[in-house]
Image: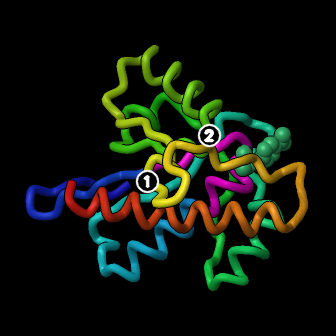
């Protein structure tokens, strides 16, 4: 991973859901695209992970990939599980829902992590503080609404982190 320098401190952001094949890969790719569009790619390290291990090594869910592609976003991640090292390394750990948030906070407390752990939709201009619902067991329309709320929230998050 790139290291910070005094001239160019980087902010590291990890998006976390349950399986790391639907919501957090979308958040990772959408946030990355917003960062590139803002010309800030030198300022951020962005990854995603899941609290569960069921899908480790897999590509994102085909429905997530489809909705991303429809919006001109490519999903390049492979699923991996959240580790204690993540909570030592990342500045911001962003949970998709409250269940993820609780799991992350338990791990973070156990190791005395300094990471700022937040809910993604705390940064949503509509529905701040709500969960990004798990779309895995639903249909394609669930992925479209999840895309929209993640996109809005990532915009809000970037506005917040630009000033960090
Ligand atoms: P994600 O969705 O947490 O947004 O990646 C899920 C993916 C897989 C499962 C649950 C949620 N699963 O139970 O396998």
Which quadrant holds the N terminus? bottom left
C-alpha distance separating marks 2 and 1 = 13 Å
Span shown in magenta: 14-26
- Most foreground residue, 57 or 39: 39
Q: Is-magenta flag for residue 70?
A: no
Q: Residues within 10 Å of mark 2 (few under 14, many from 20)?
A: many
In the image, taking residue 153 as reference, residue 82 lies left or right, namely: right
Q: Name the quarter showing ligand 1.
A: top right
- Badge 1 marks a residue whose secondary structure is helix
> Where on the picture, by quarter, is residue 58?
bottom right
Q: Which residue is mark 2?
A: 97
The answer to whether residue 130 is above or below residue 31 is: above
- Badge 2 marks a residue whose secondary structure is loop
Q: Residue at the location (83% across, 51% down)?
A: 136
Q: Are marks 2 and 1 in contact (CB under 8 Å)?
A: no
> Where on the picture, by quarter, is residue 90?
top left
- Most foreground residue, 113 or 144: 144
Query: x, y (%) of residue 60?
Result: 75, 61
Q: Residues within 10 Å of mark 1 (few under 14, many from 20)?
A: many
Query: x, y (%) of residue 163?
Result: 20, 59
Q: Which residue is mark 1?
A: 123
Query: x, y (%) of residue 49?
Result: 60, 46
Query: x, y (%) of residue 52?
Result: 72, 34
Q: Earlier in the sequence, mark 2 or mark 1?
A: 2
Q: Residue at the location (90% across, 61% down)?
A: 139
């Amino acid at each position: 991973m790139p290291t910070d320098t005094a001239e160019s401190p980087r902010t590291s952001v990890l998006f976390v859901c349950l399986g790391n094949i639907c919501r957090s890969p979308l958040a990772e790719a959408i946030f990355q695209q917003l960062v590139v569009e803002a010309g800030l790619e030198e300022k951020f390290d962005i990854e995603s992970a899941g609290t569960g291990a069921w899908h480790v090594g897999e590509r994102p869910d085909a429905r997530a990939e489809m909705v991303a592609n429809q919006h001109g976003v490519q999903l390049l991640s492979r699923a991996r599980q959240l580790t204690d090292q993540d909570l030592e390394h990342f500045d911001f750990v962003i949970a998709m829902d409250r269940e993820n948030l609780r799991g992350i906070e338990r791990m973070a407390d156990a190791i005395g992590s300094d990471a700022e752990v937040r809910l993604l939709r705390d940064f949503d201009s509509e529905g701040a503080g709500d969960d990004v619902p798990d779309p895995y067991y639903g249909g394609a329309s669930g992925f479209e609404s999840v895309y929209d709320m993640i996109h809005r929230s990532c915009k809000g998050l970037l506005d917040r982190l630009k000033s960090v």
